[in-house]
Amino acid sequence: MTSPPTSRRRTRNRLLTVAVAGAAVAALQLTGIPGAIAGDDTDATPESNGEVSAQSYGVAEFLAECEFSHRLPDDPIVFPGLPGASHMHSFFGSPVTDAHSTAADLIEAGQTTCDPLVDLSSYWMPTLFVDGEPVEPQQATFYYLGEGVNQDVTERIQPYPEGLLMLAGNAVAGPDDPVIARWSCLHAGEVEPSKDFVNCPEGSALESYLDFPQCWDGVNLDSPDHQSHMAYPVANECPETHPVPVPKMRQVVRYPVNGDPSRFELASGPGYTMHADFINAWPQEELERRVRDCLNAIVKCGADGNPL
Amino acid sequence: MPRRARRVATAAAAALLTALPLAGCGAEDDRGAAPAVTPVAEAPAAGATDPASVGGEQSAADGLSGTDLAWLQLMAPMNDRTLLLLELVEESGTDAELGGFAGELAVSHAEETTRLREILDDAGVPDTNPHEGHNMTGMVTDDELSEIAGASDVDAAARDALHEHLAQSAMVSGSAAENGSDEATTALAAELAETREGQLATLEALAG
């Protein structure tokens, strides 16, 4: 089930990653807003910011690059135990995830489509349909970032607790709802990112950015709305109700499509309904090592969790 | 491989169901969603996640597990949407038998929906549709309704959509009966799974 990305692809991603981080940090500096993402409406797209800035801001990250695994109308977090009870999802990481899956199941199965192979987590998002046909991303990259909070907070980021469940985005967002998900174009930074699908020129690819919350309540692995055990930072700090800083996961998904966005639809509806789910099934010691060596130390690491 | 229903923070659900709208396939609350220019500083509601709510107060959730909630919150809107289809059949269809069956289904679907919502109400769950606008099997969407209304053979198109709905709701109700935990919910799920199988048989006989 595993086919690691080619070295060329990885190189490209490294470059992009640096740029992404740089752009995001730059956005923070400009706006003072925690968790501002590269694709924010007012910001340049990641690539346009160049990679020079990255080092000077001190990038803290490691990542997992995952191939598409499978499609199911299941959601083990929101609709557990009910196969077929969800809109269609595209799954990455563990190839065994279905409506019944728990973190323990994923760990027991021991399989992944990700680089690194130790990441047994499951990641999923609504399937994209183009002219009614499902189109899967060329790949999905899950960045684990030490950003969006003050440096002293970054230095005390803790690994996710075993079995943590997280959601990001709003599957039932309306056109006027504020949403955190952003769409942009790979290789076409001139196209302004938007919360809805964008029209990417020929030769470019549609891409989606989505940041997960990075402050944990310190107690619950899940909550009734599957979100309130987690929170986004407030003024670069984790709020008192969610005092434990954890890695900021940024999902970047690139689809092999461009052009007229009226042909695009997510299984959950328009582009602004983009959302994502995560079951943490990293081996705890591997996650701890990466958090310590890459995030707390503010070092840019690769998929292997070692400095690049 | 043995399958088990996974309970989702039942205890926490207890304390929070009354306060928080249930999210859909990933709904989020506003605090994370503020545009970057607006301070995201609307701090999470104090006590929104009360650590003490975990591990205790199981009964306050009326025993609703994640599976129970998911099924109740799926079946209610699924039935609601099907009522629109049944209305269309009764009004625009030409097959009298199908029209009569649609009339019966409309009555039983409305009754089921009331019972589904009673359980949700008793648990203090807000009446939200986590599947709003989603394209999914068994859920009659606005687009599907328009297509059926405009079909050259409305009866045939409606019959297909009805078949999909009955089969899908039979399946998810069967799963809920097996994997749910609340007694009232699983009993209703089992009853509904059986009812749907009968309705499917009737529809197939009509189609014959």
Image (tube, coloured by chain):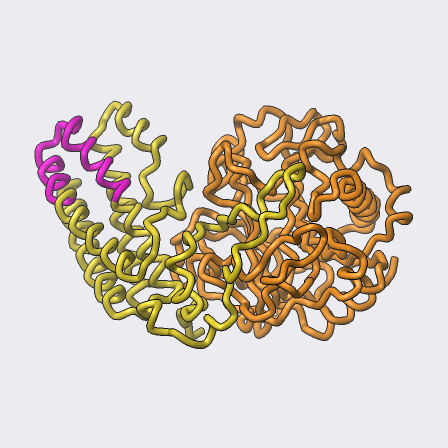
Chain colours: A orange, B yellow
- Residue A77 lies within the magenta run: no
User: Which stretch appears magenta?
Assistant: B80-105
x, y percentage for residue B41?
63, 48
Q: Residue at x 39, y 42 (%)?
A: B132
Query: Looking at the picture, does residue B186 appear above or below residue A176?
Result: below
x, y percentage for residue A35?
69, 48
Let me know if residue B1 appears in the view.
yes
Q: Residue at x 24, y 36 (%)?
A: B84
- Quarter of image, res A45: top right
* B76 sits to left or right of A245: left
Quadrant, the C terminus of chain A: bottom right
Let me know if residue A12 appears in the view.
no
- Residue B85 lies within the magenta run: yes
- Quarter of image, res B57: bottom left
x, y percentage for residue A237?
70, 56
Q: Residue at x 78, y 50 (%)?
A: A6
Q: Main secondary structure of the magenta part?
A: helix
x, y percentage for residue A36?
70, 43
Quadrant, the N terminus of chain A: bottom right
